[in-house]
Amino acid sequence: MQILEGEGVTKYFGGMAAVLKVDFSVTRGEVVGLIGPNGAGKTTLFNLISGTFTPKPGVIKFKGEKISGLRPHRICRKGVARTFQEVRVFPNMPTVENVRLGALFGTPTGLSGAEANKEADELLDFVGLSALKDVPAGGLTLVNQKRVEVARALATKAELLMLDELMAGLNSTETAEAMELVTEIRKRGVTIFMIEHVMKAIMGVCDRIIVLHHAEKIAEGTPNEIATSKKVIEVYLGE
């Protein structure tokens, strides 16, 4: 079953196309990667899915229901959550409060204060940050701030999690740990759509990969098919 699908998704900024007539789909339970050179339109596509922008033209559906044109908070409450290319935490708030906000305001029906506290504690344990729950999020390392974002997104009861360069700026050990985290999130029944430049990660955790270049989709396939595609090698991967 396709949990997310887009048809003819297009977004112009002025006279320049950032995303142009892109068709895509994500099946429930999949981990799908989105790759391409800088400026290819990857984050813009995520912004279209999450409601920051509205495609013109094009339609995006989540679980068969049109979500393009809805406000971001409504899309979130339907089960679509995301992290950001540039980490966005509330720096002066304790780590646990950052996650608690997702539980309080991002879920379809809203949780009580006690339920939100329990959810935040459980998710901080899941991402390995229990010991830092009372530390202001702005005082955490980059890798831990990224984990706060993941926990906050999961606190919304997301069925689809969109990860925007989760592994950017991480060393090899941190990248391996992040790959394991993605695998564990999938085991929880969450579908994952992820933008990533770390090819080891993309090839290691994704079932399928979509490639954008100059706003258009130029390839789609399994990691092996993408890794051996002459077109993708030419425009992105290199020899």
Image (cartoon, grey):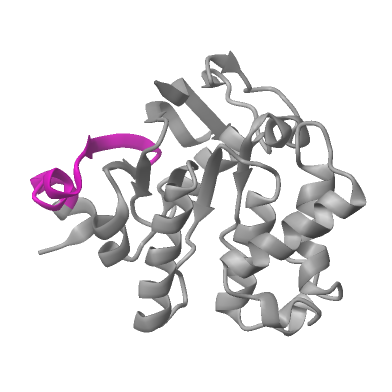
Quarter of the figure with residue 70: top right
From where the camera sits, is residue 13 visible? no
In the displayed image of the protein, which residue is found farthest to the right?
113
Q: Position of residue 49 (x, y in %)?
A: 57, 34
Q: 15 or 189: which is nearer to us?
A: 189
Q: Is residue 133 magenta?
A: no
Q: Is residue 90 left or right of residue 160?
A: right
Q: Position of residue 54 (x, y in %)?
A: 64, 27
Q: 17 or 86: which is nearer to us?
A: 86
Residue 145, above or below 65: below
Quadrant containing the C terminus is bottom left
Q: Position of residue 41 (x, y in %)?
A: 45, 44
**Residue at left offset 83%, top offset 65%:** 97
Q: 18 or 81: which is nearer to us?
A: 81
Q: Is residue 223 magenta?
A: yes
**Residue at left offset 34%, top offset 55%:** 37
Residue 182, above or below 145: above
Magenta range is 214-232
Residue 48, above or below 86: above
Residue 28, above or below 92: above
**Residue at left offset 84%, top offset 38%:** 110
Q: Is residue 139 left or right of residue 62?
A: right
From where the camera sits, is residue 51 visible? yes
Q: Is residue 223 left or right of residue 44?
A: left
Quadrant containing the N terminus is top left
Q: How many numbered marks have been drawn onto this rendered protein structure? A: 0
Quarter of the figure with residue 149: bottom right
**Residue at left offset 51%, top offset 39%:** 45
Q: Is residue 99 left or right of residue 53?
A: right
